[in-house]
């Protein structure tokens, strides 16, 4: 049985990637810390919403804390590839973002999509993964996710959800 809450604090990397041909791609959110590798399945629209929310959050943080160095990145310098083994832990229902001012780290919280079927004996308590990353890592994630989403079909169905999570 998997632990109910997993904390990657801090991550060595965080990325979004896909597997499969256009129209049937499966999107993955992946992060690693040391020897621990977590892969989650996300919808295309969740990847798009995550990218937009991270960009908005980073822009807001730059305005609120002008003394912090800018979180701009050159994406070509980052390894944004998915790592093997690609063994998803769960499908994501919703994600949220938060910021720890003392540590200058952003937390990305992903919650498992669970079926609500008490008769079948399914566990209604979702798993949670918290990924703590630098602003630069999150900026790279945001830019990379934008590129990945744009590589697909022009008019995907909207089915992603993103909530805000503040620490």
Image (spheres, rainbow, N blue to C red):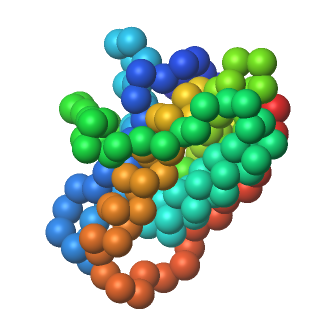
- Percent x, y of residue 108: 62, 39
Q: Residue at image x 23%, y 56%?
A: 19
Q: Is residue 24 left or right of residue 37?
A: left
User: For the view shown, which residue lies furthest in the bottom direction?
Assistant: 155
Nearest to the observer: residue 32 or residue 122: 32
- Percent x, y of residue 12: 42, 22
User: For the view shown, which residue lies furthest in the top direction?
Assistant: 34
Residue 85 in sight here: yes
Q: Residue at image x 34%, y 62%?
A: 147
Q: Residue at image x 48%, y 52%?
A: 142
**Quarter placement of the C terminus:** top right
- In the picture shown, does residue 25 fall above or below 91? below
User: For the view shown, which residue lies furthest in the left direction?
Assistant: 21
- Percent x, y of residue 49: 57, 63
Nearest to the observer: residue 94 or residue 67: 67
Question: How many marks can you see?
Answer: 0
Query: Which quadrant would residue 105 be assigned to in this image?
Result: top right
User: For the view shown, which residue lies furthest in the front direction?
Assistant: 67
- Percent x, y of residue 30: 40, 38
Nearest to the observer: residue 65 or residue 75: 65
Nearest to the observer: residue 3 or residue 12: 12
Residue 82 in sight here: no
- In the picture shown, does residue 37 fall above or below 92? above
Q: Residue at image x 59%, y 55%?
A: 55
Query: Which quadrant would residue 74 be assigned to in this image?
Result: top left
- In the picture shown, does residue 4 fall above or below 114? above
Q: Is residue 134 left or right of residue 163?
A: left
- In the picture shown, does residue 77 fall above or below 21? above
């Amino acid at each position: 049985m998997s632990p109910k809450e997993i904390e990657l604090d801090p991550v060595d990397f965080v990325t979004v990637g896909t597997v499969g041909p256009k129209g049937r791609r499966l999107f993955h959110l992946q992060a690693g810390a040391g020897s621990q590798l977590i892969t989650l399945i996300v919808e295309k629209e969740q990847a798009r919403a995550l990218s937009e929310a991270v960009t908005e959050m980073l822009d807001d943080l730059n305005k609120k804390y002008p003394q912090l160095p800018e979180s701009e990145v050159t994406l070509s310098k980052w390894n944004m590839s998915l790592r093997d083994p690609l063994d998803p832990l769960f499908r994501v229902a919703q994600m949220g973002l938060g910021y720890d001012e003392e540590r200058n780290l952003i937390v990305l919280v992903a919650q498992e999509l669970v079926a609500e079927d008490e008769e079948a004996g399914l566990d209604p308590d979702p798993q949670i993964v918290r990924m703590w990353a630098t602003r630069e890592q999150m900026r790279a994630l945001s830019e990379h996710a934008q590129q990945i989403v744009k590589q697909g079909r022009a008019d995907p169905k909207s089915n992603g959800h993103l909530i805000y999570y503040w620490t």
